[in-house]
Image (spheres, rainbow, N blue to C red):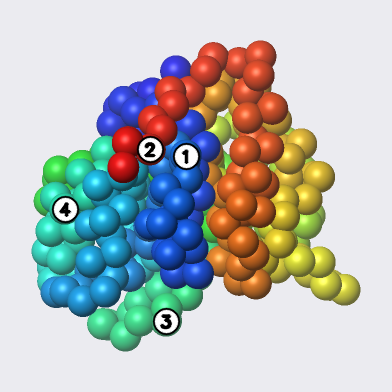
Amino acid sequence: MPANPYNGFTELGIGIGLRIPHYDHILSEKPTVDWFEIISENYMVDGGRPLEILDRILEQYRVVQHGVSMYFGSADPLNREHLKRLKALVKRTKTPFLSDHLCWGSVDGTYSHDLLPMPYTFAAARVTAQRIRQARDYLEVPICVENVSSYAEFHQSEMTEWEFLTEVVERADCGILLDVNNIYVSSKNHNFNPLDYLDNIPHHRVGQIHIAGHSKFEKYILDTHDHPVLDPVWKLYARAIEHCGATSTLLEWDAHIPSFEEVHDEALKAKAFSADRPKAGVAHAKAG
């Protein structure tokens, strides 16, 4: 079922990322949008314009938090100050679940500010799962972990990426934020069949799906989020919906951001792939 313990039993529909260029349009026009995703770190502050805007958005719309710096795969202890601020934001937004990436990015308190790929080993899976459980227990909200796009691999890996993802989420008893664009990007960079990935993960744990655009270069593909979703990614999305049913889906568009209408229209294309599937719930904007 698209609503499950890993997404707080929510069926959100089709959402887009809340981005600064669209603030004024959203607040003045109050467009009908199922939900917005925020980058948690942008609002983990004590005050100012970000929280002012967020509170006004929360009056109108459902908001779900997505993080970029938990680094579940790092060996360092979880950052307690980060968790404290994150929990305060969770209480503010009433997010039904939150997500972050299956990656590492810090060593001895020094942060790379990048989503670095994991070595796919059983030892790494155990440590990562333990950190996810610790974060969930402290935050008191379900967690979904997202597969990242990658551009390098470790010789020490003992399994495929999808086997590693499965090992982590089963050990942590958490959800998956399935990014089908990242699957496609990694499949081209590392020469594997993306359908093998999609067909061999625990589909009942998928709490949300990401779609996005990417850029092709001579020797690699880069996850750029700067233009519409390309056809191969839509095909993977269709396969994901076959496996998971109509699942809450978010379009990421983070660079060269066009008008709100263009981004929202691109996101709504996802509805066509769920036409013959169980319907996700629709949470339209409240009356302003």
Query: Dot 1 corresponds to which residue?
Result: 32
The kind of secondary structure element at disc 3 is strand
Name which residue type carries label 4. Answer: Arg
**What number is the disc on residue 285?**
2
Asked if marks 1 and 3 touch (Cβ < 8 Å), the reply is no
Which quadrant: the N terminus? top left
Callout 2: 10 Å neighbours few (<14), some, many (20+)?
some
Q: Residues within 10 Å of mark 4 (few under 14, many from 20)?
A: few
Distance CA(mark 4)–CA(mark 1)? 22 Å
Camera-near label (4 vs 1) is 1
Looking at the image, which residue is at 73% across and 40% down?
A: 234
| Residue at the spot 32% in from the left edge and 36% down from the top edge | 287
How far is disc 1 from disc 3 in space, using C-alphas?
37 Å
**Residue holding disc 4:** 92
CA–CA distance in space, label 1 to label 2: 5 Å
State the CA–CA distance, disc 2 to disc 3: 37 Å
* First-in-chain label (4 vs 3): 4
Which tag, 4 or 1, sits closer to the chain's start?
1
Q: CA distance from mark 4 to mark 2?
A: 18 Å
Determine whether 226 is above or below 269 in the image.
below
Q: Which mark is residue 112?
A: 3
The amino acid on which the numbered mark 2 sits, given as a three-letter code, is Ala
Residue name at image x 50 percent, y 49 percent = 16
The kind of residue tagged 3 is Ser
Relative to 236, residue 223 above or below: below
